[in-house]
Image: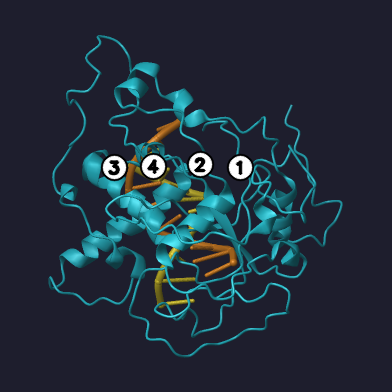
Chain colours: A cyan, B orange, C yellow
Amino acid sequence: MGEEVKMSDYEGGVEDEERVLEWEAGLPSLDDLTPLSQALIPPELASAFSISPVQYRTLLDVNQASKDTLSSLRGVAQSSNNFKSLGESHESGVVEADENDRDGSGSDSRKSRKIMECAEEADSAFPGDNSAEDPSARALKRPRLVWTPQLHKRFVDVVGHLGIKNAVPKTIMQLMNVEGLTRENVASHLQKYRLYLKRMQGLSPEGPSASDQLFSSTPVPQSLHESGAASAQSNGNSHGNGHFQVPMPIPYPPVMPMPVLGMTHHGHGHMGMPVGAAPNGYHHGFESHHHHHHYNMLQQQRDWSGNKYGSVVTYPHVAPSDK
DNA sequence: ATGTTAATAT
DNA sequence: CATATTAACA
């Protein structure tokens, strides 16, 4: 009893940063990836909401879709394939989650979606480079999750629907339906979000607080004042029994986070990308991109997918082991 | 055990 | 320094 396996004993030179490679190799087989989102929802509820077998978008698909939505500009050089560059980039794993923003914004322009030749086998989500499958790598330390505006939008949306009262990490996480998102992630963000609301409260209504590019960009729902909004509504809950944990399932398409491998240049004048010009800060992932310090672009617009770091990488489709 | 808050890390 | 993870606590 009580057997702890220490893997660090063997090496000793392996740092935590190298975890990135770990999940890269720890890709669960497709068989493991099963549609759990619907499985958790009772058939009755599902049919009531007309929730059909939602198809999961491949990482690359989602990624491309998000980028496409935001960047309707000219397609500058778009080759973000630094998958094999992992060997050198070991600053800090950064994960970025994207989602298909199709709420509140009429995005119909389906620009050309070429490139991404490595995305043919989206199921693996891992272009050629990786390749080693490690089913044992599941609870590994995943890189920092980057809350992209889209993801935050979903977060705020759910919180607004639940009300500040029922806005608890678990419920939020469940309702967000973002694969890979953990309770801890939501809790952490929720904390920051609450602080943001509180801080803004005691300040002038018009607060050009340049801080919090993310928060300030997302409209705060008014439901944050009332208590308990969607709860004992006329849902299908009046069945007598049935403890559905889903207060009010939102027809949100399941989205899986897209991890982004980034180099944490903890320099100073970080961030900075011509949003209104070429959001594609990706160079040709082949050259040894040095640290380009773009000291320009007025940091005004606060959109973009939060790709303030760079490289794109895949995320281990964490199996629906539930929490 | 889940939600919060503080501390710590990146 | 802001943001996210981890730990401690209620």
Q: Given contact means CB atoms under 8 Å apart, are the residues at marks 4 and 2 in contact?
A: no
Cα–Cα span, label 4 and label 2: 9 Å
Identify the residue under disc 2: A179
Kindly indicate the quadrant of the structure image that contains residue A172: top left
> Closer to the N terminus: mark 4 or mark 1?
4
C-alpha distance separating marks 1 and 3: 26 Å
Query: Which of the labelled discs sits on residue A167, or is there none?
Result: 3
Task: Tell me if mark 4 has few (under 14), some (14-19) or many (20+) residues whose alpha carbon lies within 10 angstroms of its own.
Answer: many
Label 2: which secondary element: loop
Q: Which amino acid does label 2 sit on?
A: Glu
Q: Distance between the residues labelled 2 and 3?
A: 19 Å
Mark 2 in CB contact with mark 1 (< 8 angstroms):
yes
Q: In this view, does A57 lie to the left or right of A160?
A: right
Which residue does the image show at 29% across and 66% down from the upper left?
Answer: A217
Task: State whether residue A146 is above or below residue A156.
Answer: below
Closer to the N terminus: mark 1 or mark 3? 3
Which residue does the image show at 41% across and 40% down from the upper left? A253
Q: What residue type is labelled 3?
A: Ala
Whether marks 2 and 3 lie on the same chain: yes
Distance (Cα) linking label 4 and label 3:
12 Å
| Identity, as a three-letter code, of the amino acid under mark 1 | His
Chain letter belonging to callout 3: A
Q: Position of residue A278 (x, y in %)?
A: 48, 78
Q: Tell me if label 4 and label 3 are in contact, CB under 8 Å.
A: no
Pick whichever, A17 or A300, lies toward us. Answer: A300
**Mark 2 belongs to which subunit?**
A
- The residue sitting at the right extreme is A10
Q: Which of marks 4 and 3 is in front?
A: 4
Q: Which mark is residue A317?
A: 1
Q: Where is residue A77 in the image (x, y as percent from the top left)?
A: 59, 75
Q: Where is residue A193 in the image (x, y as percent from the top left)?
A: 31, 57
